[in-house]
Amino acid sequence: MAIPSQFRLLGQRRFLPFYLTQFSGAFNDNLYKNALLLLIAYQTTGLMGMSVNTVINLAAFLFILPFFLFSGIAGQMADRYEKAAIIRKVKLAEIGIMALATLALWLGWYEGLLVLLFLMGTQSTFFGPVKYAILPQVLGEDELVGGNGLVSMGTFVAILLGTIAAGLLMGLEGAVKLTAASVLVMAVLGYIAARQVPDTGVTLNAQAVRFRPVLETWHLMGVAAERKPVLGAILAISWFWFLGAAYLTQFPNFALSNLQGDETVVTLLLSMFIVGISIGSMMCERLTRHRITLTPIPWGALGLTLFGVDLFFAVPASPEPSTWWTLVTDPAYIRVLADLVGIGVCGGLFIVPLYAFIQHETPENKRARIIAALNVINALFMVVSALTGIVVLGLLEVGIPGFFLLISLVNGLVLIAVWRLRRRAG
């Protein structure tokens, strides 16, 4: 008898409340972060004597810094204590942070909003290990790939919707107050969903929680390196986040400089990329036949290279001013969209089986710490991605299509690595 589709999990209490909790959190993170960046860019002339560009980069740094500081502690807590209880406490903390954010938005206290952005990053740091470590406890082995596919799809769709919502709210009269109310309401809804997450039981783990920022994060690397196939899977996922960050960061300038597009073109590019990831994530369950296998990984890596190379050749040499409608009706631009969807689909095929593999191959009493290590390396790769973009686009003066071509060709080396990983993991 055929095993039912992964979508049946959305009708079950063991999965749905958790799914809604993580979806609301990803949405709220991106709504708040993007709204704040837009406020800084368009409604201030800089803060604390710094330019707008400096403040925007500082904001990005403050959000990612907690992953380096607190991931070790977050992983220890998620391994030692009951995971549903941690989820509820983290979401309760989000309400407090967003209540303060609401007050800061109403008062126009932008320096305080930057501090709260750091606290939002801290909250995300403590939620991250639980988010993926809980899945093997509530899902069967034959459901793990499908469940990860749903989580991946939900996360990226929430990122898209949160980004779009921030842009829409900033265009309305009374944007600041509407944003303040929205982030607080979303935090409350996330906590309500978290209250329904069933208890998972306490893992037998004598690991003490040591409050040593940075040092405990460094110790995570040793835990992650205990099994080479798992470490290889972690590095492969982090490489995808390097690629993803490179594409997402360049979309605004790519739309303006290479497609002569308006702001609707940026949204369309982002949408096509995320729709592709969602489709690829949903395909994984059927392609793996509900098994924990790395078979789709090399094909996903190959597609990332081929579609990335084709994107370089698809960019019009002499673009004319365009809107989103131009891109979906003009064959010269449709190829660009098709490549972005293809890159997204292959990205979904690439990362979902890797997440399931890591969850399956790690002992329960260390799983959250290994997921925390993954989050740290992801953050590190995204920082390196930003620095690479600065060097290639700024110092070497390579165009954005050339940058996309370069990282696609480098991905060919990753293809060789993941092919070996697949053979070693069986």
Image: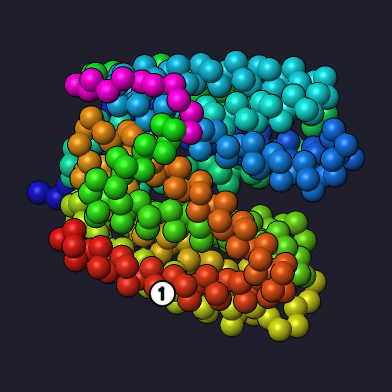
The answer to whether 171 appears left or right of 356 in the picture is right
Residue 318 image offset from top left, x and y in percent: 75, 83
Q: How many marks?
A: 1
Magenta-highlighted residues = 204-214
Nearer the observer, 369 or 336? 369
- Residue at which label 1 appears: 412
Query: Which residue sits at x=63%, y=21%?
Result: 98
Q: Image check: 315 left or right of 145? A: right
The residue lying at 56 percent from left, 58 percent from top is: 385
Q: Position of residue 326 (x, y in %)?
A: 70, 70
Q: Is residue 336 above or below residue 194?
A: below
- Colour convention: rainbow
Is residue 86 positioned above or below 367 on the image? above
Position of 109 with respect to 123 (left or right) is right
Q: Is residue 185 magenta?
A: no
Q: Residues within 10 Å of mark 1 (few under 14, many from 20)?
A: some
Residue 217 vs residue 333, the one in the foreground = 217
Q: Measuring 54% from the left and 28% from the top, which residue is drawn there?
A: 122
- Residue 84 in view (yes/no): no
